[in-house]
Structure formats: C-alpha cells, structure tokens
Amino acid sequence: MHPLLTKPLLEELDRYLARAVGEPPDPAALADYIRDQSQRSFRDRIFDAIRRSGLADVDVYSRAGISKSTFSRIRSGDRPAKDVAIALAFVLGLSAAQTEALLGSAGYYLSKSSVGDLIVRFFLERGVHDILAVNDALYAHHQPLLAGVRA
C-alpha cells in the first residue's frame, strides 16, 4: 500500500464516493432495465429479413457485393461495416424504417448532415433498392460507395 493511503484515508474516500455516487443499483432493477431496454441484435434482424425474403445466403451476399467470409463473420455475430449493413438492407428491399432499425442494432444511423447518408435515405424513402443506382449517385457526389462496388 502507498504510504499516503492509510486505512482512515481509504475509509474516508469510500464514504465520500458512497455520498457522491449514491448506492449501487439494485441488481434486480438493473437486470430488469437491461431486459426492457435491449433491442434485437443486428445478426438476428438481418437473418430474419433474409428468411422472410426467400433469398439464398449466396444470393444475398453476392448481390450486396460482400465476400462469403464477411457474411460468415456476420452470421457469427460480428458487427459489419456501415456500408455493408446498408448494402444488405438494399438487397433485402427493407424500408427506410426497417433500415434505420437494422442500422441502429449495429450502432449506426443515417445522419442528416452527411451527403452520403442523405443519398441513401433519398433512395430508401422512394423504395428504390438498386445498389448500382445508389452507388452512381454516391459517386456523382464524391461519396464513398456501398459495399462491393468500387470505382
């Protein structure tokens, strides 16, 4: 123990922290909060959407322009890059709201201050799910392209 950290000083620090921070949360209340606030994972959402689409996995990752290994990592629970998640949403024909929920489950969102995100939102809101058309618009505005198709 450091010579300045005497037992009385440590006890005083513990009392101070208890007053400053308050009592630790009730474990049951914390567990209830986590259960009530948690959302479905990206993995669960994307594979439910794939099942509903009727597409084979190979069709999904091929059309999205991602590799089989990237798709396998997603299946294992890895979080994909944002452009990969968006490309998958387009391939699966997800609505703007469904895409926002999917992106949110991976910790992403479509920003209204990003030209690229606004272009993606524009196509989603109009129900246009053609990745090549989206990438053409992104390219024309000097924005990074969605997964798979590079200039």
Image (cartoon, rainbow, N blue to C red):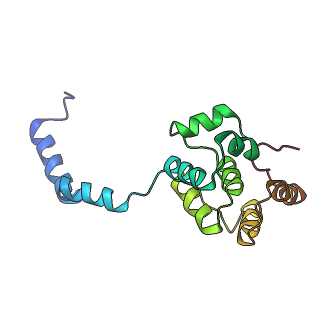
User: Does residue 147 appear in the picture of this structure?
Assistant: no
| 86 up-or-down from 76: above or below | below
Toward the left, the furthest residue is 8
Q: Residue at x 71, y 53 (%)?
A: 91
Residue that lies at the very extreme toward the bottom in this rendered image:
126
Question: In the picture provided, is 143 more to the left or to the right than 10?
Answer: right
Residue plotted at (67% across, 51% down): 88
Q: How many marks?
A: 0
Q: Residue drawn 21% across and 29% down?
A: 2
- What residue appears at the point 25 percent right and 59 percent down from the top-left corner? 32
From the viewer's side, name the closer residue of 92 and 151. Answer: 92
Residue 128 x/y as whole percent: 77, 65
The correct choice, above or below, for 1 with respect to 33 in the image is above
Residue in the foreground of this view, choosing between 118 and 5? 118
Q: Residue 98 in the image: state x and y as whole percent.
A: 59, 64
- Whether residue 103 is visible to the viewer of this picture, yes or no, is yes
Which quarter of the figure has residue 11? top left
